[in-house]
Image (tube, rainbow, N blue to C red):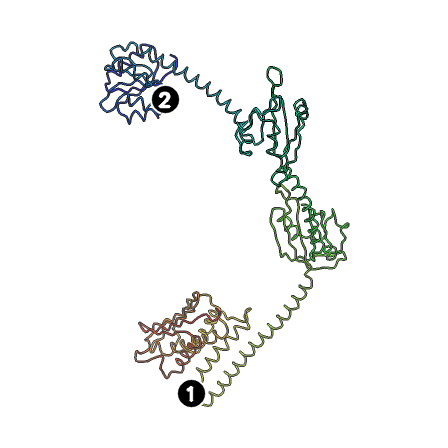
Amino acid sequence: MEDTIKILFLEDVPLDVELMEAELKREGIDFDSRHVEKEEEYRRELTEFQPDVILADHSLPHFDGISAMNIAQDISPQIPFIFVSGQMGEEFAVEMLKKGATDYVLKHNLSKLGHSVKRALNEADEYLKKKKAEEKLAKSEEKYRTLFDLSPDYVVVLNLDGEVLDINQRVEEDSGLSRDDFIGKDVNEFFKLFVNESILDENAMRSFLANDQTKPIEIKMNQDGDIGYLEMHHAPIMKEGKVFAIQVILRNITQSKNAENALIESRERLYDVNAYLEAIINASPFAIVDLYPDGRVKSLWNPAAENIFGWRKEDVLGNYLPFLKNNEKCQNIMRGALSGESKSDIELKCARKDNEIIHTMMATAPLLNVDGNIRGIMATFADISDMVAAETQIKASLDEKEVLLREIHHRVKNNLQIISSLMSLQSEYTQEPETLKMFQESKNRIRSMALIHEKLYQSKDLAHVDFVEYLKSLVEMLLSFHREESDEINVSFNCDQVNLEIDTAISMGLIVNELLSNCFKHAFPGQKNGEVIINLSKNEENYLLEVVDNGVGIPEDIDIKNTDSLGLQIVQTLTIQLKGVLEHEHDGGTKFKLSFPDSSR
């Protein structure tokens, strides 16, 4: 044999396998083989090796040939199965052949093995060819029967007398009757099931059967109160050159008819929609324009466009609008629309036909064709000239009020400085140190408030103070006043960006003024150097201010909440006004912690 075959040996004696292989080679059989002894190996090789023939011993220590044959018949029944055994009787061999074994060979007569294998393979090949031919024929018959039965149309075969010879499955399903109920019946009985009337009398039937035209006949049917339509085709069935039957095909075209009617209605609705859209566009107060990709006006130029820009429709169709063509901003917007971008609320200055400059609010969107490709630009314009004029007037009024508010802050600051100067003049009439100290502390408090108003009238935001910048100015002022006590004191800042409303800023300024003044006067007695740190931060709801020094600290017997110190009393009072909490620590110096809520929330 020319082709290499695959042989699976089921044998527990290796020598017997060698003898069988030697005999097969002697017969000139080219093969590849696998050798198994157990069921698990046998099943695996059936699947993976896929042998062309199986040579099996009758009895093995862990398996047997009968079980192996049954397994092979379940998994691959086409594989020839040959028993090769030394203990097989004649009756048993015949019984195995009846149950499906291909052949049997006795081990003491292995000379027959090659012939048995060749014959088994030839028979298997013939069997496969025959089976394939039968399957092909069966599939062909099944295919044509399937086409007949599963056709979505009603198919009826009539003899030359107009009697039903056959119907397809669709007729059975829709009529609720079986094929046997129709066979031999007159064709009109068939039609009554669908159109409730006889459509062919005897003469019409003969004319119908004799007619060789191929044009379909349309039948209107009224069934259960619903109107439907059938399209009837017929064709002769030839046998030995003669017509022996007629095949009639009835196609239910109700859906296509309804679709056709729906299309007509849809066209009417589309006409109505176009009419509605045209009315809306013509009544719109906005100019609505469609443009070619190069910017020329295409077909749409509504009455509002004529009123806003002054050109009539016939003047602009197919032409460029000057305020679009010569405007780089407009060109960029149009390029964006052509790349699929929609934009709105675009303020644009436009020149009317009479060269009057007007302000418009423009919006653009790409125009798509049925394939989804951009074929132009849709643009709308609203005349906002009156709104721009009103906005300009309001802005001028706001600027005037802002100037007035800055002047108020400036005058308040000047008045506070006048009060401070008057106190300085008044202090010249006393030489009492305590009195002079009280005058100076009051002046510092006034200056801290004046500094707030100075920052406000210098700021762009008249409602809020940049408190970090304010703190730095306040510290510089206090260091200058306490230069004898604070010559070597270093003040550092660790502050977030914080903007405070004016009332909060004044209270905070006074608190920092008192805490720093107290620190400069008392924290570093007898020494000139020291460290003061100001921390300011804000979380979602609260502000936190910390004033920390490394001085001697406040004596433990002093209760800061119950003290004669005016400065600490001011701090306590302002803390209450801020709805805050003041804490005091004196571990290696003094730390004041003030937390208070954000009043703007």
Q: Residues within 10 Å of mark 1 (few under 14, many from 20)?
A: few
Depth check, mark 1 against mark 2: the one in front is 2
The quarter of the displayed image where residue 530 is located = bottom left
Direction left: furthest residue? 61
Local secondary structure at mark 1: helix
Q: Quadrant of the N terminus?
A: top left
Q: Which residue is mark 2?
A: 77
The amino acid pointed to by label 2 is Pro
Where residue 490 appears, as percent x and y from the top left, is 39, 71
Q: Which amino acid, by three-letter code, is at mark 1? A: Thr
Q: Is residue 217 left or right of residue 46?
A: right
First along the sequence among labels 1 and 2: 2
Which of 109 and 491 lies nearest the eye of the viewer? 109
Vertical placement of residue 509 versus 348, above or below: below
Considering depth in this image, is 434 or 158 the residue closer to the camera?
A: 158
- Compare residues 536 and 199 and report the one nearer the observer: 199
Q: CA distance from mark 1 to mark 2?
A: 123 Å
Where residue 110 sits, quadrant-wise, is top left
Q: Position of residue 125 (x, y in %)?
A: 40, 16
* Badge number at residue 435: 1
Number of residue marks? 2
